[in-house]
Amino acid sequence: MSKHDRRQKRTGSPDVEVGANWLPQDAVEVLLVSSDSYLQEEAKRIVAAAGGSLRTAADVGEALHGWDSAAVVLVGSDVRELPPRRRAPTVLLGRASDGDGLWRLAAALGAERVAVLPEAAGWLAEHLSLSGSPDPGGNVVGVIGGSGGAGATTTAVWLAQAAASHGISTMLIDGDPWGGGLELAVTADDIPGLRWPDFAETRGSIDPTKLRESLPIAGGFAYLSWPGTRDAVPTPDAGAVAAVMDAARRSFELIVVDIGRNGDGTSTLAWDCDRLLLQALSHLKSAVAAARILQELPPVDSGLLIRGNSSTSVDASLIADSLGLPLVCRVPELRGVASGTELGRLLELGRRKPVVRFAEAVLELDGKGQ
């Protein structure tokens, strides 16, 4: 499986302290394109905290020289058009008052991430410092269902299992707080380790080694799940989620995220992914629902997974064409998946040959690991 360039999250905690051990040896060259005095001052402070050097351009014309040579390009929410034949900006900067329009603008400009200031100041400082690191960190693959019942959770489990069987250090993340707990599908055993609520009070960075050592393991991979209970549990804020994802990238080669179809998943965890896999049923209703979900996803490398046999009414390639996504693979139909999910036995089904072939094809595994 090939690695993509590191991408980061749109939000984070303003309390993050950038440790000297994370600062790059050479100052990161950052270009900010904005005439907004508030964004200019915030960027100046944040870049200084990250040990970088900042060049500010009031408009796109002024930014042309040095656009492609900058390590990181920041664009303010006052910018509406990009110069021709220039790479997309790394991060779009804005304020909370910009509202949802900030993410629509990010999609239009092709920005990799969004930072809402001042809330995301801490995350942005750490992101800039890590931009000078020679190691981009692990690869994040997100799986999201185009409609209810598409089977995204099952696919995410099988992908993590297949990667781990190839010797790839892998983490599976439950991205749906309303899904009942991914851990119930992974194993019937009560395995000790941290769950999402344990990070509710997290502020700042998380030590990658400690994260890796504290997670439960099943099927050869570590996983972070919402508890499989009916009890009310505390929920980590966006800064804590960002810290977990940063630590996960520094701890594992592959992170598979089961992204819930709720707004939280599509507007947060999806932006952490280097690659997104949209899974749909080969039915017209599911295809329509998938098209709606696709509009909420960030502009990253994406592909389509289709679940359903040849007797269904809508051809897989037709669905892919209508969505404008490459058809990556068909998800194998197996008996016992529903009961296996209820009994925590998905890993047993994941060892079957059709599943192994499917997961290896999706992850582009060749039997030699990553």
Image (cartoon, rainbow, N blue to C red):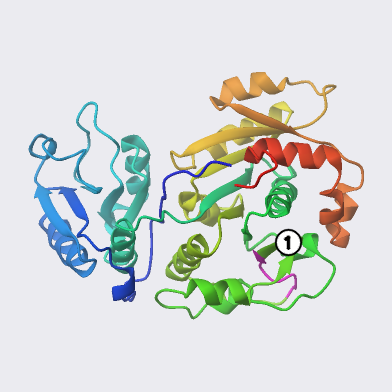
The amino acid pointed to by label 1 is Gly
Q: Which residue is mark 1?
A: 220
Q: Residue at x 50, y 67 (%)?
A: 244
Q: Residue at x 31, y 69 (%)?
A: 122
Instruction: Determine whether 345 is above or below 291 in the image.
Output: below
Q: Secondary structure at mark 1?
A: loop
The majority secondary structure of the magenta stretch comes to loop
Q: Nearer the viewer, residue 350 or 278?
A: 350
Q: Position of residue 111 (x, y in %)?
A: 33, 42
Classify residue 281 by image quadrant: top right
Q: Position of residue 348 (x, y in %)?
A: 87, 54
Q: In this rendering, would 240 be left or right of 356?
A: left
Query: Which residues, given as a range, are shown in magenta?
Result: 223-230
Residue 76 visible in the displayed image: no
Residue 298 visible in the displayed image: yes
Q: In this rendering, would 111 be left or right of 238?
A: left
The residue carrying pointer 1 sits among few (fewer than 14), some (14 to 19) or many (20 or more) residues within 10 Å by Cα, namely some
Instruction: Determine whether 160 is above or below 223 in the image.
Output: above
Q: Position of residue 21 (x, y in %)?
A: 33, 73
Q: Quadrant of the N terminus?
A: top right
Instruction: Determine whether 310 is above or below 151 in the image.
Output: above
Classify residue 315 by image quadrant: top right
Q: Residue at x 14, y 60 (%)?
A: 38
